Image (cartoon, grey):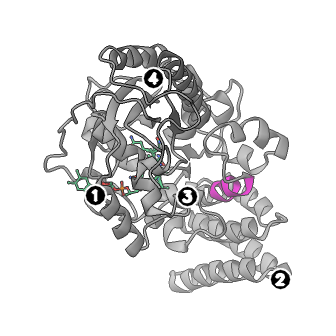
Amino acid sequence: MVPDPTADSGHPAPRPDPGLKEELKAQARRLGLDLVGIARCTVSERDRQALADREARGFRTTFEERDIDLRVELDRLLPGCQSAVVVGIAYLPYRPVPPPPGEPDGPRGRLSRYCRGQDYHGVLREKLRTLARWLEERCPGARTYLFADTEPPIDRSLAEQAGLGFFGRSTNLITREYGTWVFLGGLLTNVPLEPDPPWSGTCGTCTRCLDACPTGALVEPYVLDSHRCLSYVTQMKGYVPEEFRAALGDWIFGCDICQEVCPYNLRPSLLVGDHPELNPWPEVGGDAGPLLERILRMTNAEFRSVWQKTAAGWRGKTVLQRNAVIALGNSGDPRALPLLQEALGDPRPVIRGHAAWALGRLAELRPELAATALALLREAAGREEDPDAAREIRAALDRLEGRRAESPT
Ligand code: B12
């Protein structure tokens, strides 16, 4: 059945209106949307192919819509869809944020820039909803479909088509003004709007992102094996595959390595965002990052009142605490030892299991702690009843005992 573009409004489909596009863009900027461009709602065969290849190679995550047609045929989402109004909001902070005054010192974790302040989804959605209402009032018969990360459209592809930036080899969208530090979203609409020209930026011969990725997740330029990407690893539930634990270093949610090394993000002319709500919160440690001890000991109430309001909260408290345990091991800081001892007695097996690995890792980095770590692990092995946690403890013991046997006395 051919969708009826006049459906549910009672108005005829909106007609081209030459002044509308600039008015709409001005309105978007007034709302604090830093970048705005228009794309046509045509099917991109590159998108379809990229999604099919990704599926075939096992690179799709469970965070994405499975139905490829729904992701590329945009009028399935909004019948009669003519244009995509694509927006970007810059999140590189405009001022430094220190940790809360008087906070004790200790090993800290690193949060990716995208989750240090208020959850961007809410910030972006509110602005987009206001923009949608404006368009619907300004243009009788206008209908809109909002997208911002969690909906089927491929946000970066629409942003590229709308002239906001170009696909870098890291698969991140690189913008002229803010480099990659932008969140993307937009509105599909049945209003016809003149598309903007794409920006033909290029990575030239640069492969810094591919070279810097500690897990080799960028398997080819423009192709990410999502399951190797540390950003994904910090967001997965359950046991983190061992090969990624040391590579995580101090990252406890998300990873910015491929963005930090990008020359487009290192230009002196790079602009910063002016959105205080997206700036790092002191409650999550400001620019210094959160104290791992605080994460490990946080209550459900603290999780709800702080972390759940950032983009680092959606996978729950246990995932964050598991990541903090891994980071403690990687810290090489002797102050991590009593915290890991505590984690080894946690009621959740997944925390005990990672604490065992982390103790082993700490002892590897600080050989003077090996005897204590061994004693703690042997004690834990004697009382552990959960098979997965017991396997982790055994593995940590084997590695430590093996190393001690090898090392000269
Ligand atoms: C699933 C997902 C993830 C997964 C997989 C990421 C991925 N690269 O696909 C994981 C969890 C790993 C992830 C990580 C991150 N994500 Co994410 N993620 C998404 C999500 C929900 C879907 C992505 C998707 O559809 N991929 C599908 C495939 C097809 O895309 P692709 O692999 O990039 O393929 C394209 C290119 O490779 C290109 N291409 C292919 N070949 C060629 C050849 C040439 C010559 C060229 C030019 C291009 C090109 O075309 C393909 C599309 O047609 C989007 C939101 C959304 N709905 O779009 C956010 C989104 C992409 N994520 C975002 C962010 C911020 C991140 C992180 C930076 C977060 C962090 N700091 O930890 C990292 C970046 C990691 C990385 N290098 O991509 C932003 C990106 C903003 C930007 N400026 O690019 C988005 C758009 C969310 C948003 N609305 O703001 N993410």
Where in the figure is residue 184, as x and y percent of width and height?
A: 44, 37
Tags 1 and 3 touching, CB below 8 Å? no
Tell me which residue sits at (34%, 20%) in the image. 21
Where in the figure is residue 83, as x and y percent of width and height?
A: 37, 35
Res. 22 image quadrant: top left
* Mark 2 to mark 3 CA distance (whole Å): 39 Å
Q: Earlier in the sequence, mark 4 or mark 2?
A: 4
**Residue receiving disc 3:** 63
- Which of labels 4 and 1 is toward the front? 1
Residue 207 in the figure: left or right of residue 216: left
Where in the figure is residue 120, as x and y percent of width and height?
A: 56, 34
Looking at the rendering, the stretch of residues picked out in magenta corresponds to 317-324
Determine whether the residue tagged by mark 2 lies in a helix, strand or loop: helix
Q: Earlier in the sequence, mark 2 or mark 3?
A: 3
- Identified by mark 2, the residue type is Gly
Is residue 245 shown to the viewer in this render? yes
Q: Residues within 10 Å of mark 1 (few under 14, many from 20)?
A: few
Res. 110 image quadrant: top right
- Identified by mark 1, the residue type is Glu
As drawn, the label of residue 45 is 1
Above-or-below relation of 253 to 57: above
* Mark 4 to mark 1 CA distance (whole Å): 29 Å
Based on the picture, tell me whether residue 30 belongs to the magenta stretch. Answer: no
If the image is split into quadrants, where does the C terminus sit?
Answer: bottom right
Residue ranking furthest to the left: 205
Q: Is mark 3 within 8 Å of ligand 1?
A: yes
> Looking at this view, is 108 or 205 the one in front?
205
**Residue receiving disc 2:** 382
- Identified by mark 3, the residue type is Phe
* Mark 4 to mark 2 CA distance (whole Å): 57 Å
**Residue receiving disc 4:** 33
Q: Earlier in the sequence, mark 4 or mark 1?
A: 4
